[in-house]
Image: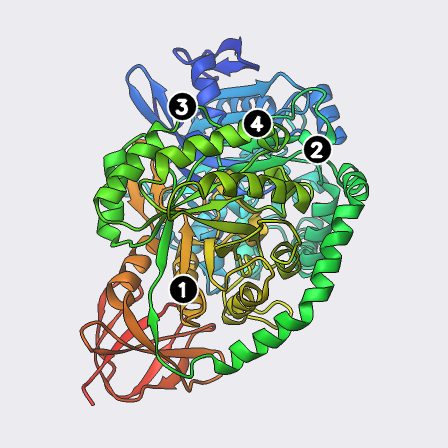
Amino acid sequence: MSTSAAPGSALPRFEPFAGGGLRGEAAPGLGAAEAARLADPASSVATIHWGRNYLYAAELRTASGTLPVVVKQFSNQGLRRRLDRRLRGSKAERSWRVAGELLRAGLATPEPLMWIESDPADGPSFFVARRLEAAVEVRHFFRRLNGEADAGPFPEVDDGSFLARLGALARRLHDAGIVYRDLSMGNILAVEAAGGDPDLFLVDFNRARTGRRPGALTRTRDLCRLPVLAAAHRAAYLGGYWGEVPPRWSFRWWFFGLSVSGYILKHRMKKGLAGGLRLRRRHSRRGTVHPHIPPAAAGAAARDKAVWDHLSDQPHQHAGKLEKVAIRLRDAPSHLRDAFCFTTSLAPVWRRYRELREARYRGPTEFTGIGLALRPWPADPEAQLREIAELGAGPLLLRLHPWEDRHDDEERLAAALAAAGHELSFVIPQNRDLVRDRGRWRAAVAELADRFSIYGPRFQVGQAVNRSKWGIWSFDEYLDLYLEAAEILRRRPGVEVMGPAVIDFEFQSLIALVNRRRPALRFDVVSSLLYVDRRGAPENRQLGLDTADKVTLLRAIADTGRCSAGRCWVTEVNWPLWEGPHSPAGKSVSVGEEEQADYLVRYYLLALGTGLVERVFWWRLIARGYGLVAPETDGSLRRRPAWHAMRTLIAELDGATFHGPLAAPAGAWLYRFTSRSDAEVVVGWSVGGGVRATLPRPALRALSRDGRALPPPPASAVTLDPSPTYFFLVAD
């Protein structure tokens, strides 16, 4: 198949298909099975755009091999979208129809291969087209043309001639009776051609209207979405469209200029109101979910509406806001007990926090406890073991799923890791079925204790117990589960039981749980899933506390708890990536891979540098959306920057002695260590870029965050940026 269907031709013959809750049309040789695979975002190899609709790259399987494709997933949730789909067809089907009109008009577009609809009225629809290799958006041409700093690479073109080509392209659209309605910088792609101007391809045309000859107003509204600002540029663009340059006093000239200004103003206003708009969208879209998430069981009670999301590897709660409020009201006595425990325990916690904070960094501490959390990787278990070995990881935390019937993959992984000498601990999470069926819960815990206690002595009972999607609606429910599991686990000699596994910085829940009056209630290690601030850097503050302060508060809670023993672990942390529904959190809190790597190192330095927490575990090794290693669709594994950052951190500082922070300018940090080889190392970073700081002595050598050798700074003065740098000082 070609990169694009031949301009001037009709669409290739498409064959209808139906099955598995999907229907549509596909190119010959494709059908329902391949449609079902592509319609699952698990088939994606990369996220292209994550917004109102989800756009991802995938590989289409054909009899002659694989083809690179782009899948656009359209959401149909909400009354307006369902009605629009019923009256005008799905956006995927409309995209296919417009693609045919474009090709018949001699206009290039990536080759359409398939359109897919879900049978339910609010189910998603999909449009699949051939992926253009090395295509770039025309936005980079305009950014370069208008002198913007964030312009990306774009083929070398003559500005006037290229603008005239864009104008002529728009004219061909309108002459063919196509009003694009979104002819913007991102919807025209350029592919460099040998010995000539780049080829232009039109994409994202589900909003287009066909079969009408537009008038002057409609033409100008379609033209004005490209930021043609300078008079000379407008002359070239409008000349390409109208066949001659309109006089500057003419309606065509001044109305186009007015329309461009109005379009730019509208977008600036949207940007200025972005925060409020996002908030309104979040409220207006409550109850909407990623289309791949299965619905709750028919007739399920409000407490039982959580389902498993296989892409982010966590539950999703379908219960609505009013349902949650009603449940909270029914559970009011339990919540009142929590409030009483919190208020009566807060004073001693705060006193202990102030003591610990005052004593922090007064003496050297051992920097250790860089841990990694895992699930099995059945697709290539040997590759996972190699990744762990090459990473140099020490403590490992293996999450078990007690609701599953088989645990052979987990046991094989645990046996291999224990044989390699790793310190191994386990997590036993819960779901709603196990909360309701206590006999099944006890049987599952007993089986897991028998099978895994020979590989490691520590078990965390519970997971994110302050989140109803994990099956817990009141802390009394969790404590009942914990006590039953702890009694079973402690029958094995030497086993320690961890909990309560509160997620996020919700110290009120943690204080309440470790101070409950329950016979035999004891947490050998207080565990916390301490996500500091997913909306930004680990140095960010909440209620005035940054990462180091929050870890100090965690230890104060463990020290003063009625049921705790003064030890604490952070058993889960990560920063979600901008990878669509694979991300475990929303797009507003996702980051890029480079930011994730920076934040990982800085979190470990800030948290373990306190000397108050024994272990910190990154969740997890292999995963789309947040893991250190990205699984590719061909079965290979790609190490993300965070993998290299953790490997360098382990190699250079695991087992080192931390001597505390050095004086540094505002917004910068200098952490001083003595390595295991007695080298003096200072790790420096800043929240913003370009902060100047002074080392105690000049550096003999330097390493980047990822272990790359850097030129040593010529003197003690160094420039710090968000990516941590390791400075190895000359001997004193």
Residue at the (32%, 24%) spot, across then down: 66
Which mark, by number, is residue 439?
Answer: 4
Q: The disc labelled 3 sits on which kind of residue?
A: Ala
Residues 486 and 171: in front is 486
Are circles 3 and 2 on residues that touch, CB within 8 Å?
Answer: no
Mark 1 lies on residue: 604
N-term-proximal mark, 2 vs 1: 2
The image quarter in which residue 641 lies: bottom left
Q: Which mark is residue 6?
A: 3
| Quarter of image, res 89 | top right
Other-residue count near label 4 (Cα within 10 Å), few / some / many at <14 / 14–19 / ≥20:
few
Provide residue 726's location: percent of width, then percent of height. 29, 73
Question: Is 286 left, or right, of 127 in this rendering?
Answer: right
Q: CA distance from mark 3 to mark 4?
A: 64 Å
Image marks 3 and 4: residues in contact by CB distance under 8 Å = no
Q: Amino acid at mark 2?
A: Arg
Up-down relation of residue 599 to residue 494 (above or below): below
Q: Which of marks 1 and 4 precedes in the sequence?
A: 4
Indicate which label's residue lies in the foreground, 2 or 1: 2
Q: Is residue 53 above or below residue 368?
A: above
- Model colouring: rainbow
- Asked which secondary structure carries label 4, the reply is helix
* Whether residue 110 is visible: no
